[in-house]
Amino acid sequence: MKYDLKNQLVLITGASSGIGREIAIAFSQHNARLILIARNESKLSETQSFCLKNTPDCHIFIGDIGNWDTVKKLGNAIKDTIGIPDIIVNNAGEGCFLAIFECIENEVEHALKSPFLSSYYCVQFFIKDFMSRNSGTILNVNAPAAYFPFPKMIAYSCTRAAVRCFSRCLRLDLKGYRIKIQDLVPGLTQSNYFENNNMDWNKRIPFINRLFFKPLTPQEVAKAALKGLFRKQKLICPQPLMTFFIVCAQYFPNTFDFLVSLKSK
Ligand SMILES: NC(=O)c1ccc[n+]([C@@H]2O[C@H](COP(=O)([O-])OP(=O)(O)OC[C@H]3O[C@@H](n4cnc5c(N)ncnc54)[C@H](OP(=O)(O)O)[C@@H]3O)[C@@H](O)[C@H]2O)c1
């Protein structure tokens, strides 16, 4: 077996569907011990059943981790009953795919809850244990909009940029510790994400993304996550061309603002 996660305790948020679920299954096939979190108990139990075919150690915890009190409650239960994770995969995420003038209420607060606050709270809860043990990996699942924002997806793009900044700040704050911070950046992925977040992706995902990137399957993303984890890659892009886009976007932000605004017709 190429990758072995034996004895590694991995906490995966948002494992009840899509990418998180496939990461959990892929990691279970490589002997990881798993802690899975999401809000939907029946869907999370389904993921657990799949994982238990491969690993004897798969625990589920139910709750909204965009809430600090919930993270403290779940975190304490995890510490008391299972232990400190070796790897945290911050995957839970929702999206708000609106322009600022389409927002009616406090949609931005909802968008901030996951992935930004959920990732922040989960790391905050366990970080002192990682530091005293002087080891650990934090894998933040992010999106291309963190690097080049998409039009009419303001809360979505801002929260992804916040997650990107979170990874950078963690690297700065944890300098000197043997704690790895990695970013997984898949392009458009065929999960139920857009249905779950009331978005017709055909209408909002920029034409340039649709033109250059074939949608990924959650299994392809999970495979890339596993490979990137073992290669200790800082930036894990399942599509190599996306790495090129991300690098170019840093040097030519105005060009990217133009490109993402292009329409197909
Ligand atoms: N699909 C794409 O095209 C794409 C592209 C790039 C990046 N991503 C990112 O990949 C991640 C996973 O997305 P996906 O495509 O797999 O979508 P998904 O199928 O909708 O999965 C999202 C997961 O997050 C969980 N979740 C959301 N908010 C939560 C909260 N407050 N507390 C606990 N769990 C929460 C959901 O579970 P419950 O509803 O059961 O809580 C679900 O398991 C997201 O962060 C997303 O931004 C997706």
Image (tube, rainbow, N blue to C red):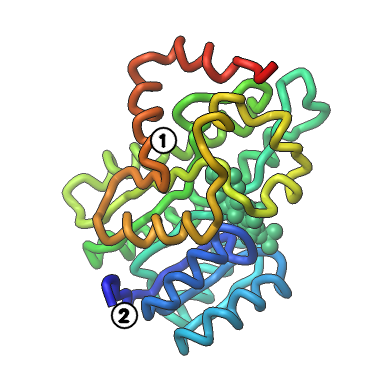
For residue 26, what is the image quadrant? bottom left
Mark yes or no: residue 115 visible: no
Q: Which amino acid does label 2 sit on?
A: Lys
Q: Where is residue 254 in the image (x, y as percent from the top left)?
A: 46, 10
In this view, the residue farthest toward the left is: 176
Mark yes or no: residue 244 visible: yes
Residue drawn at (33%, 27%) of the image: 247
Q: In this view, does 68 lie to the left or right of 222?
A: right
Residue drawn at (70%, 41%) of the image: 110
Q: Which amino acid does label 1 sit on?
A: Met
Front residue of 42/133: it is 42
For mark 1, give the secondary structure.
Answer: helix
Specify the label residue 252 is tagged with.
Answer: none
> Which circle, 1 or 2, is nearer the viewer?
1
Q: Residues within 10 Å of mark 2 (few under 14, many from 20)?
A: few
Verify CB contact (< 8 Å) between mark 1 and mark 2: no
**Residue beneath disc 1:** 242
Residue 212 lies, with reference to residue 100, above or below; the image says: below
